Image (cartoon, grey):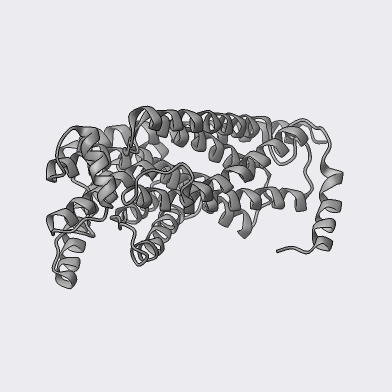
């Protein structure tokens, strides 16, 4: 806990900056770092709260004031405060970054009461794919996109710029992949049921069964744990999740960027796995396949022609993702079976392999769009440089 003297010094440092200004205002470097390290703290709290939240909802009956919600709310409070600071002072952001942050924060704050109402009306609404939940992800999507732009445009070149940019992309990947955790927890909950065990408390199972109007049986467990089509998990992972890795590789501009962003996210999920399971919370499958796909994204960028890279990369990345999912389910399930005598508990959600075609087409469209936007940006920078060179005596 900070002493009154340190708090006084912090206030004396910060108060001179509290002046009205337009977005794009020249920002002192020490203030810029404080603002964006504040965003790192906010997103870290939201990540920890969100990761705990999914596991919590597969064990306990929903509670608005559950500890994961409070942890997530602490991160949200910091994010709201930073949004207000950016908007009032104009420091640390250009107009585009500020608009993204403000729209994202606004959508998120509107989604919170809508989600509470939704749960009051529809009961559990355990699925991560409900409209009110999607609004929460969408708000966070725009919020992180704005923070990414602000840091990318304003941070000075160097290692810190690259590392923090990678961290923001890892948070971006976490938010995009978040709804997929429903299937990652759900498949293990069904596996536990098949091995005559349950992770959920009886009150949660009975509430879900009553809501569905059926007894507590395997059919109810399946509807409770995997209420979405099997193709959704791999298609969404390839189109949405891997698009984040493509964008990360383009903006960071270094070989290995996509692999490291995926590895950072998967690494956090791997560290949280024992922390949750050893404290009695349900485990989840961990998306190790994202690291394999990230490596293939990095390899694709060895191809210098952008649109050829997008085509070849899409084929390679989609094949790698689906292949890694199949291998993960088989190999990791076998490892766990050998250790615990149970089957498939570290595997992957059900996989409809025929959906690979649609996943690949979706990724190709997004990858081509990303390459087109990057090409336009490079072109505008070239024109700007020529204008400056011509105007300089």
**Left or right: where does residue 306 sit relative to residue 5?**
left
Q: Residue at x 36, y 66 (%)?
A: 274
**Left or right: where does residue 281 sit relative to residue 206?**
right
Residue situated in front as seen by the camera: 211 or 16: 211
**Left or right: where does residue 202 sit relative to residue 382?**
left
Can see residue 167?
A: yes
Q: Residue at x 35, y 47 (%)?
A: 57
Q: Quadrant of residue 160?
A: bottom right
Residue situated in front as seen by the camera: 225 or 213: 213
> Residue 51 location, x and y as percent?
42, 52
Q: Residue at x 58, y 37 (%)?
A: 146
Residue 122 higher or lower than 290, as above or below: above
> Residue 191 location, x and y as percent?
17, 55
> Residue 86 location, x and y as percent?
71, 37
Residue situated in front as seen by the camera: 127 or 347: 127
> Residue 126 location, x and y as percent?
32, 39
Q: Quadrant of residue 288?
A: bottom left
Residue 146 higher or lower than 151, as above or below: above
Q: Quadrant of the C terminus?
A: top right
Can see residue 170?
A: no
Q: Residue at x 19, y 68 (%)?
A: 335
Q: How many marks?
A: 0
**Left or right: where does residue 388 sit relative to residue 48?**
right
Residue situated in front as seen by the camera: 329 or 281: 281
Q: Quadrant of the N terminus?
A: bottom right
């Amino acid at each position: 806990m900070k002493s009154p003297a340190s708090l006084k010094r912090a206030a004396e440092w910060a108060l001179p900056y509290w002046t009205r200004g337009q977005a794009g205002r020249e920002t002192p470097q020490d203030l810029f770092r404080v603002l964006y390290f504040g965003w790192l703290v906010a997103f870290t709290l939201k990540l920890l709260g969100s990761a705990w939240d999914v596991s919590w909802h597969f064990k306990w009956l929903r509670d608005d004031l559950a500890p994961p919600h409070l942890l997530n709310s602490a991160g949200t409070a910091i994010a709201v405060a930073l949004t207000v600071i950016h908007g009032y002072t104009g420091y640390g952001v250009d107009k585009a970054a500020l608009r993204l942050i403000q729209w994202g924060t606004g959508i998120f704050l509107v989604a919170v009461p809508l989600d509470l109402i939704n749960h009051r009306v529809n009961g559990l609404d355990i699925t991560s794919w409900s409209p009110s939940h999607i609004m929460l992800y969408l708000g966070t999507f725009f919020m992180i996109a704005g923070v990414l732009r602000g840091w990318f445009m304003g941070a000075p070149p160097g290692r810190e710029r690259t590392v923090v940019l990678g961290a923001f992309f890892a948070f971006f990947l976490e938010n995009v992949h978040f709804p997929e955790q429903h299937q990652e927890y759900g498949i293990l909950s069904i596996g536990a049921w098949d091995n005559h065990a349950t992770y959920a408390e009886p009150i949660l199972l009975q509430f879900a069964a009553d809501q569905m109007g059926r007894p507590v049986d395997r059919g109810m467990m399946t509807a409770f744990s995997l209420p979405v089509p099997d193709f959704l998990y791999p298609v969404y992972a390839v189109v949405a999740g891997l698009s984040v890795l493509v964008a990360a590789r383009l903006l960071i501009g270094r070989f290995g960027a996509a692999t490291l962003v995926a590895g950072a996210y998967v690494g956090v999920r791997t560290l949280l796995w024992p922390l949750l399971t050893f404290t009695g919370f349900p485990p989840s499958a961990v998306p190790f396949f994202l690291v394999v796909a990230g490596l293939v994204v990095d390899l694709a960028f060895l191809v210098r022609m952008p649109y050829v890279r997008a085509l070849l990369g899409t084929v390679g990345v989609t094949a790698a993702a689906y292949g890694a999912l199949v291998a993960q389910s088989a190999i990791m399930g076998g490892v766990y079976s050998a250790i615990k005598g149970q089957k498939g508990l570290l595997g992957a959600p059900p996989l409809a392999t025929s959906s690979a075609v649609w996943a690949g087409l979706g990724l190709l469209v997004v990858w081509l769009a990303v390459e087109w936007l990057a090409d336009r940006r490079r072109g505008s920078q070239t024109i700007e440089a020529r204008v400056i060179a011509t105007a300089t005596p």
